[in-house]
Structures are given as structure tokens and as C-alpha cells.
Image (cartoon, rainbow, N blue to C red):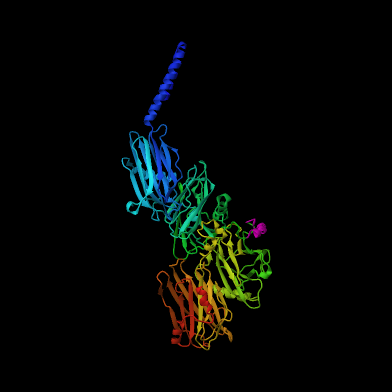
């Protein structure tokens, strides 16, 4: 200001001087300018404020790293070092701005171990702050700050802390400030700060060793996630309600959306956060991790002010919080939050929140456009104008996603993860194909592209593809084949084959594509069976695998279908297709519950294990976009290389040992009735026999034992055994065993149910209709207490051609092995004999069953 007035005065006087005085005027003008500059320097020297900050670390076990600074008044002229190790010093300089006279700000350093280790859950920070005014009026603050790892320090977060807390707690500089605390391993330290009280400020901060006796009673200040007022979580509603909900027109300017993720699930950490923007840009940081009990807020906005759209997809990987292991074994599982916000009409603002499973090690790499691919291939088809709560079935957890979507005036989306008990209404996570794995396989997709390129061409039909995409091998290796079995009851509508042969067995890299008309009856079921067997088969029955796939209309969603599936193992023999179909359908009639029901776009998959080490992978995937191709694929068994993107703390070989353990059921048939010889003639189970099943006979006085190995991803297991009298193959006993895990957690209830059916000489061997004896057994893992009856002994109602006898059932859980179960079924002519016999330990012809369970 002084310089400007002086220059104006010089210009004014020069215009009113006579020419003869020009030389004198110039000299005087220069003198005035020099005086003005000197005056400006004097004023600046008397009003400027500075701060020289020195930080010294003399602690041998601690280093300071990753600083964040916030300057409210002034500017930073000397940047401090990013890391300050033991024995090092660093300096920072701050100056008032040209037209200012004050300095205000704060500096934050993370305190960690000298080797770089940080605490598992929380991080500790050193905070120093200053305020320097003219007139020797200075203030400072020294504090320790703690936060969860999921909360990211940014300039904005430090600014909020400055305004909300720091500026209210400044102290005078007449005495040094000191704090003593420790890291999580008991490493004690003292931080101290001293500062002079002049406008040329000087602050010294030291980090030194300390012992436990000096520890403060004051806890570090904890930075918590943002708290929100009561959130109204959206209820399930149909699409018509969402579209016609009352709404105001949005402004014609740009658009924005705030996404808040509430991780209220104590078992899951969200990590490797990635954001794919299709329109607009992010206006806040993206936290890399969101640990349990933490909220994270992400803001997005349009790139242009005039009618700018905001469209993007936020993806986090889900891992077990305690172990870092995947939440669904065999996959990388992600939560995807897809948003589309337009500025001009809130009716067009939509969201989709889904759980995705993938085998792609690169997902969700933004530069590879994989997030955009997930949006187009899967998520786009599930976008709604309102929030839809959903439940998901993971390996060891039932997860619920609650959603609150406020579309106006500025969109705000809340998503909450919470664990729930009970069986989820929806099935497994949606599958997004990518990387080296896809369904259909890439070579088949190219060959059938002409048939599925026009979505309208088959709008009135259902498209199905069956392919064997296993790697090529020589026929002497006895590769697995895949074949469609026709239902003997004719439940499947007429097929039209487009490519391939539907009647033959598919070898490696063979396939066929066919169509079927849509189901017209609301209650109609289309059931088809697919057999997986070794290519070379003997005259005797060999173990095979059958996929049962049932399709019916979804009464709650027009045009959509519900799928019911089961993968079972049973002896199979050429020429017995109709018998196989009848036996599997009878088995399916015993299944209860919703564990094997899936909505559209659900992935149905599992490992297939057949004798001789012939392992494969079976997958069923209904596409979510037209023409809604449903694929049944037999592929190679997967390795674990696609997990390489997860931050593993161990080698893959060690990582594989964390795979879910299978369940085992050991069944003992104890026949104490001399006139009732029984022989196992057939069985159907959702697992494979772990012991020999050849010549299984329930000889009086000797146990007949079989152990079944059951898949760990199933929560409902069923085994059906057919025992027949050798002299009369249509007369005997059917035993159906159910094991139900009501919840995935270790503390869940278990329910075992065994049904014994007597089959008379004139009864249908696959459909017994006689009286049954049933007992239920409940076992609470958390308390190890027994509820209900452990055994039942009572006379049975028998057909007239079978003598009266007694039967007893006993269920048990192996001690210390909560995944191993025993079932004893005992028959005898005397009640006391039955009571005593059913309680004996299992010993029989197959003693190796007990050995297998212990290994």
C-alpha cells in the first residue's frame, strides 16, 4: 500500500512540473521511491512472523514416517523429511503470507517400530500444532493421536481435526509439553516440545526413550469414523413402487453422490479398494481398507457443471479379518457398489450393490477396464431406483447388505455389512468371469457367437450350452465325460439342437448348444440330469457323478427363473439311465430347505472327485444379459495362482492348508437279527465314499460300516442307502440320513435326522411307502450340551410278511472333531438287546473307516 501511494504521488507531481525542472523532479522521484521501499521493508520486518521447527529422534526402536501437514495461515517454505529414523533430525519452515501476519498449522507423523512394523488394528501418531501472532503472543500443542488403520489421513481430515479440536486446546509456550506412551509391544517413548514466545518462532520436538513408570494416565486421542444420524434402511420393494415413488426434479446443474460404507461385520475386512469412474470424478480419498466397526465416506461428483452425470463403481475385496483368508474358498470375493446419478431427473438415479466372485487375479484393475466390464456384464442388469437389502451365503458366514439410497436433492448412499444367523434367502455370490477363466470357455464362446449375437432371436426360448472344457489328454488316461440324461418322466420340453450332439458323451473340448421354449405353466418344473463318468467303464457299476438341474418360473419376478440344483454321487452302469433318473428324483424328494436354490445369475460350482484321482470342476452359470444363456461346464480343477494378488503372509502351499475341511459321516449298520441278512445294493449321496463299498453286507453279529466324505461348502447333506435281502432283492431296508448345519458359524446348531423305511416284497424298491422310524439329534457346539433324545428304541409297524423286530438309532459327534459324525442303526428281535447293542462303539469289517477319520 505504501509503495502504491508513493508511486502515485510521483506520477502526479511529474505531470505538473515545468520542463526546466525535469532533472530535479527525476532525482526527487527516485529519492521518494527509495524511501517508500525502505518504509515497506520496515513495515514488513515489524509485522512478519515465522516458525522454524526441528524434530529430533534419539529413540533406537522408533521411527517417524508419513507426515501430513495442514497450514491454516501462512505457507510452508521448507519441507520436512518423510521419514525420521533413529539419530536423525529434520527441519520444517513456515512463513506468514505477504499480506498476512499470523501463522497457524499442524504437523502429524506416524510413530512406528524402527523396522517398519505397525500395530495390527490401530496406528499411533505424533501431533504438533502452532499459532503465532504479533506481539509475542504464541501458542502450541503436543498430543498423541490414535486411529484405526481403515481411516486414511488426508489434509482434509487433519483440517477437520484442527477446527474441531486442536484450536480449542492450544497452550501457552512458557513451559515445555511432554507425553509418554508405548507401542503395542511395550516399547516406551517420550515426546516433548518447547517453543519460544516471539514472532520469530522456534519449536523443537524430541522423541526419546522412556520406561513404564513414566507412562501417562491420559490416553491418546482416538480419531473415530464419522457418526451419522439415524439412517432409514430401505425395505424390500418391487420395481414399480420404486419408479413411481414421489420425487422432486433435481437442479439442472451438475450431480454428485456420497457413498458411506458401514462395516459392521466383525469377521470381514474390506481391502484393496478401487474406484472405476464412467462419468465424473472422485472428490475425496478412497480408503484402501475398511476394518470392522469402521465407516468410510467416498464422494463423487460430475466433471461438468451443466447437466453433468456421475457414474462409477466402487469395489472392495472381502477377506477374513483375523486370518486374511478368502471368505469363499476358491474365489476372490468382492462387494461392488455401482451408482448412476443424473442431474436433471432423480427418477433416473439408480444403484446396484452386489457380491461378486471371480477367479481373475487382476480384478479390479481400473486400467484394464475390468470394473467397467463387471458393470456392463453383471451389475447394470441389477440397477434399481431404490435400495434393496440382500443376504448372501459365504463359506463361514451369512452376510446381509442393508441399503439406504436417498436420491434427492444430492444423492447419498449408505451400505451396511452385517452378519446374520439363519439361512440366507439368496445363494452364492454372483460370478464375474475374467482372466484365464470364463463360462462359457473362450474357444466355445467364439464358435457360438453367431447364435447369441442377436438377443431378440431367441427371446421366446431358453438357450443352454453343455461343454466339456477339460484339458486334452490321451484316451488311455481315462478322461471324464459329460452327458445329458433324459428324464424318464418327460418333464423337459422339446429341445432344438443348434450345434453338436445331445445324445453322445462329451469328451474334452466338445460341446453342444440347444434351445427350449419358455415354461408356460407357473408351477411347471424342467428337470434335467447330467452325468459325469470316466470314459472307460467296466461291466460292473462304477462311481459316477450326477448334476440335477431344475428350472421353474420365479413368481416374484416376471421373466426370471429359479434354479434348484444338486450334485450327487452314485454307482452308475451303462443301460440303466432310467433307473438312475428315478433314483436321483427319489433322493431329491428327501431334500428340504433352500440351500440348493439359486436366483438368476448365481454361480453353482464345486469340485468333482471320482476314484483314481480324476478331479474336475463343475460349474453352472446363467448369464444375466440377453439372450440369457445357461451354461453347464466341466472344467479342470483349479490351482491357487489367482490368489497371488491377495497380500498373503505365507506361501501358496501353506495357504492351501487353510482350505475348508470336509465333513465326514461314518454309518454303522448293526444287525443283531439272525434271520435278516442285508446287502447294500445302491446308494445316493452328496459326497463320495471314503471307504470301500464292495460287497457291503450287514451280517448278523458284525457291523457294516461306510464313511462318506462330504463337501465343506454344503450346509445340508443327505445320504440314502438301499439294503436288500440277497434272496429277495425287492425286500429290505432303506436308510436316509440328513445332516443339516442351520448356520455357518462354529457355534451353530447342528441337526441330524435318520429315517429308516422297511420295504416289503411287493413295494417299489426306489419309493418305499411303509412306516418309518425317525429320531432327531441336536448338538450345540458352543456349549457341548445335548438336547433331545440320543436314542430311540421302539417296536416298528411292519408289513405282515416281515417278522416283528426292534430298531434303534444313535447319533454322535467325534470328540474334538466337530466336522466328523457317527450314525448307528441297530436291528434286533429283543428290546433290551437293541438298547445294549446300539450303544457299543463302532467296530466292523471296515475297521479302516475309523483310521481314516483320525487322519
Left or right of 783 on screen, residue 251 = right
Please say if 415 is above or below 74. Answer: below
Count of marks placed on residues: 0
Residue furthest top in the image: 20
Instruction: Please report the residue visible at 42 percent of the width from the left and 42 percent of the height from the top.
Output: 70
Please say if 41 is above or below 590. Answer: above
The reply to whether residue 402 is in sight is yes
Instruction: Please state the extent of the stretch shown in magenta in the rendering.
Output: 441-455
Q: Nearer the viewer, residue 545 or 231?
A: 545
Residue 842 coordinates in the image, percent (x, y): 49, 80
Residue 234 coordinates in the image, percent (x, y): 45, 56
Q: Quadrant of the N terminus?
A: top left
Q: Nearer the viewer, residue 281 or 41?
A: 41
Q: Nearer the viewer, residue 557 or 627?
A: 627
> Is 590 part of what is drawn in magenta?
no
Left or right of 293 on screen, residue 735 = right
The reply to whether residue 239 is in sight is no
Residue 61 coordinates in the image, percent (x, y): 42, 51
Please say if 562 is above or below 212. Answer: below
> Is 454 part of what is drawn in magenta?
yes
Magenta-colored segment: predominant secondary structure:
helix
Residue furthest left in the image: 174
Residue 818 coordinates in the image, percent (x, y): 46, 71
Q: Quadrant of residue 561?
A: bottom right
Left or right of 728 on screen, residue 142 = left
Amino acid at each position: 500500500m505504501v509503495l502504491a501511494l508513493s508511486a502515485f504521488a510521483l506520477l502526479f507531481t511529474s505531470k505538473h512540473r515545468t520542463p526546466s525542472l525535469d532533472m530535479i523532479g527525476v532525482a526527487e522521484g527516485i529519492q521518494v521511491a527509495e524511501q517508500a521501499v525502505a518504509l515497506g521493508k520496515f513495515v514488513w520486518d515489524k509485522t512478519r512472523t515465522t516458525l522454524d521447527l526441528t524434530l529430533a529422534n534419539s529413540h533406537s526402536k522408533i521411527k517417524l514416517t508419513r507426515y501430513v501437514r495442514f497450514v491454516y495461515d501462512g505457507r510452508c517454505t521448507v519441507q520436512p523429511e518423510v521419514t525420521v529414523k533413529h539419530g536423525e533430525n529434520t527441519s520444517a519452515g513456515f512463513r506468514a503470507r505477504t499480506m498476512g501476519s499470523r501463522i497457524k498449522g499442524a504437523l502429524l507423523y506416524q510413530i512406528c517400530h524402527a523396522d517398519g512394523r505397525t500395530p495390527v488394528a490401530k496406528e499411533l501418531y505424533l501431533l504438533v500444532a502452532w499459532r503465532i501472532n504479533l506481539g509475542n503472543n504464541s501458542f502450541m500443542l503436543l498430543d498423541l493421536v490414535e486411529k484405526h488403520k481403515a481411516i486414511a489421513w488426508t489434509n482434509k481430515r487433519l483440517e477437520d481435526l484442527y477446527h474441531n479440536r486442536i484450536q480449542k486446546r492450544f497452550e501457552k509456550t512458557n513451559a515445555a509439553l511432554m507425553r509418554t506412551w508405548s507401542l503395542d509391544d511395550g516399547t516406551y517413548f517420550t515426546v516433548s516440545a518447547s517453543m519460544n514466545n516471539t514472532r520469530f518462532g522456534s519449536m523443537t520436538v524430541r522423541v526419546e526413550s522412556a520406561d513404564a513408570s513414566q507412562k501417562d494416565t491420559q490416553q491418546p486421542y482416538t480419531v473415530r469414523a464419522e457418526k451419522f444420524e439415524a439412517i432409514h434402511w430401505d425395505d424390500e420393494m418391487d420395481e414399480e413402487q420404486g419408479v413411481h415413488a414421489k420425487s422432486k426434479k433435481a437442479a439442472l446443474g451438475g450431480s454428485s453422490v456420497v457413498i458411506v460404507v458401514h462395516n459392521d461385520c466383525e469377521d470381514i475386512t474390506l481391502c484393496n479398494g478401487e474406484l472405476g469412474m464412467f462419468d465424473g470424478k472422485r472428490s475425496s480419498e478412497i480408503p484402501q481398507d475398511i476394518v470392522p466397526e469402521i465407516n468410510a465416506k467416498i464422494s463423487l461428483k460430475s466433471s461438468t457443471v451443466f447437466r453433468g452425470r456421475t457414474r462409477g463403481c466402487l469395489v472392495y475385496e472381502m477377506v477374513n479379518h483375523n486370518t486374511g483368508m478368502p471368505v469363499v474358498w476358491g474365489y476372490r470375493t468382492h462387494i461392488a457398489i455401482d451408482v448412476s446419478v443424473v442431474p436433471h431427473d432423480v427418477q433416473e438415479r439408480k444403484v446396484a450393490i452386489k457380491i461378486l466372485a471371480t477367479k481373475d487375479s487382476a480384478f479390479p484393475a481400473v486400467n484394464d477396464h475390468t470394473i467397467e466390464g463387471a458393470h456392463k456384464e453383471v451389475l447394470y442388469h441389477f440397477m434399481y431406483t431404490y435400495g434393496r437389502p440382500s443376504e448372501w451365503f459365504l463359506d463361514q458366514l451369512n452376510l446381509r447388505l442393508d441399503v439406504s439410497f436417498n436420491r434427492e436433492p444430492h444423492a447419498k448412499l449408505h451400505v451396511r455389512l452385517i452378519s446374520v444367523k439363519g439361512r440366507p434367502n439368496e445363494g452364492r455370490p454372483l460370478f464375474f468371469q475374467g482372466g484365464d477363466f470364463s463360462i462359457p470357455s473362450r474357444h466355445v464362446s467364439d464358435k457360438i457367437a453367431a447364435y447369441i449375437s442377436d438377443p431378440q432371436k431367441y427371446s421366446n426360448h431358453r438357450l443352454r450350452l453343455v461343454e466339456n472344457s477339460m484339458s486334452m489328454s490321451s484316451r488311455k488316461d481315462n478322461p471324464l465325460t459329460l452327458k445329458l440324461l433324459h428324464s424318464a418322466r418327460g418333464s423337459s420340453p422339446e429341445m432344438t439342437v443348434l450345434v453338436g450332439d445331445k445324445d453322445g458323451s462329451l469328451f474334452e473340448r466338445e460341446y453342444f448348444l440347444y434351445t427350449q421354449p419358455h415354461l408356460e405353466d407357473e408351477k411347471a418344473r424342467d428337470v434335467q440330469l447330467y452325468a459325469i463318468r470316466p470314459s472307460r467303464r467296466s461291466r460292473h457299476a462304477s462311481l459316477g457323478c450326477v448334476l440335477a438341474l431344475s428350472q421353474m418360473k420365479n413368481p416374484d419376478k416376471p421373466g426370471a427363473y429359479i434354479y434348484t440344483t444338486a450334485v450327487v454321487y452314485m454307482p452308475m452302469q451303462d443301460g440303466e439311465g432310467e433307473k438312475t433318473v428315478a433314483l436321483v428324483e427319489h433322493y431329491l424328494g428327501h431334500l428340504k430347505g433352500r440351500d440348493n436354490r439359486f436366483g438368476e445369475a448365481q454361480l453353482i460350482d464345486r469340485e468333482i472327485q471320482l476314484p483314481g484321482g480324476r478331479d474336475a470342476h463343475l460349474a453352472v452359470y446363467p448369464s444375466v444379459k440377453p439372450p440369457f444363456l445357461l451354461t453347464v461346464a466341466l472344467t479342470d480343477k483349479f490351482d491357487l495362482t489367482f490368489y497371488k494378488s491377495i497380500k498373503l503372509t505365507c506361501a501358496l502351499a501353506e495357504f492351501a492348508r487353510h482350505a475348508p475341511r470336509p465333513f465326514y459321516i461314518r454309518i454303522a449298520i448293526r444287525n443283531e437279527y439272525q434271520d435278516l441278512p442285508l446287502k447294500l445294493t445302491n446308494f445316493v449321496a452328496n459326497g463320495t465314499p471314503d471307504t470301500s463299498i464292495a460287497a457291503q453286507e450287514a451280517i448278523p453279529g458284525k457291523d457294516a460300516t461306510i464313511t462318506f466324505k462330504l463337501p465343506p461348502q454344503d450346509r445340508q447333506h443327505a445320504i440314502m442307502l438301499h439294503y436288500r435281502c440277497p434272496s429277495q432283492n425287492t425286500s429290505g431296508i432303506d436308510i436316509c440320513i440328513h445332516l443339516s448345519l442351520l448356520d455357518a458359524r462354529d457355534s451353530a446348531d447342528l441337526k441330524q435326522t435318520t429315517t429308516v423305511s422297511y420295504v416289503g416284497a411287493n413295494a417299489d424298491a426306489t419309493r418305499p411307502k411303509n412306516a418309518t422310524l425317525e429320531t432327531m439329534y441336536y448338538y450345540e457346539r458352543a456349549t457341548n450340551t445335548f438336547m433331545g433324545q440320543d436314542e430311540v428304541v421302539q417296536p416298528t409297524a411292519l408289513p405282515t410278511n416281515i417278522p416283528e423286530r426292534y430298531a434303534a438309532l444313535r447319533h454322535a459327534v467325534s470328540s474334538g472333531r466337530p466336522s466328523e459324525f457317527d450314525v448307528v442303526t441297530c436291528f434286533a428281535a429283543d428290546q433290551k438287546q437293541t438298547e445294549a447293542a446300539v450303544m457299543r462303539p463302532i467296530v466292523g469289517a471296515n475297521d479302516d473307516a475309523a483310521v481314516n477319520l483320525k487322519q
